[in-house]
Image (spheres, rainbow, N blue to C red):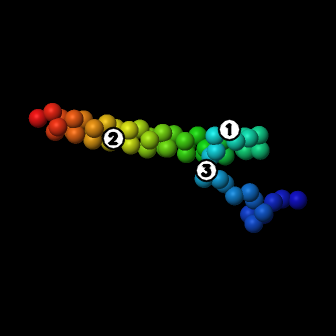
Amino acid sequence: MPMDDDHRKPISTTHHIGEDLASLSVEELQNRISLLETEIIRLRGAIEAKNASRLAADQFFKR
């Protein structure tokens, strides 16, 4: 019997480190990779912004 759309498992938009991956499909795993790659880019941007702020403060206070 085919599954109708109302009974399908919703696709998760979160990932928990160490989570069991056995029940996920290839598509779901690829979505998780994409999600994590996007988060890595966001985290690197935050690091760059913090480093730039620190550099600006260091330059300002050195006179």
Q: Nearer the viewer, mark 3 or mark 2?
A: 2
Residue 42, percent from left and from top: 43, 44
Residue 27, percent from left and from top: 66, 45
> Few, some or many C-alpha atoms within 10 Å of disc 2 (few <14, some 14-19, many ≥20)?
few
Residue where numbered disc 1 is placed: 18
Image quadrant holding the C terminus, namely top left
Indicate left or right for 63 with 51 as reference: left
Give above or below for 59 relative to 25: above
| Mark 1 residue type | Gly
Residue 61, percent from left and from top: 17, 37
Q: How many marks?
A: 3
Residue located 32% across and 42% down the image: 49
Image quadrant holding the N terminus, namely bottom right
Q: Do we see residue 13 in this rendering? A: yes
Secondary structure under the numbered disc 1 in the rendered image: loop
Q: Nearer the viewer, mark 2 or mark 1?
A: 2
Residue where numbered disc 2 is placed: 50
Residue where numbered disc 3 is placed: 14
Indicate left or right for 3 with 31 as reference: right
| Mark 2 residue type | Lys
Q: Which of the 4 quarters of the picture holds residue 50?
A: top left
Residue 60, percent from left and from top: 16, 39
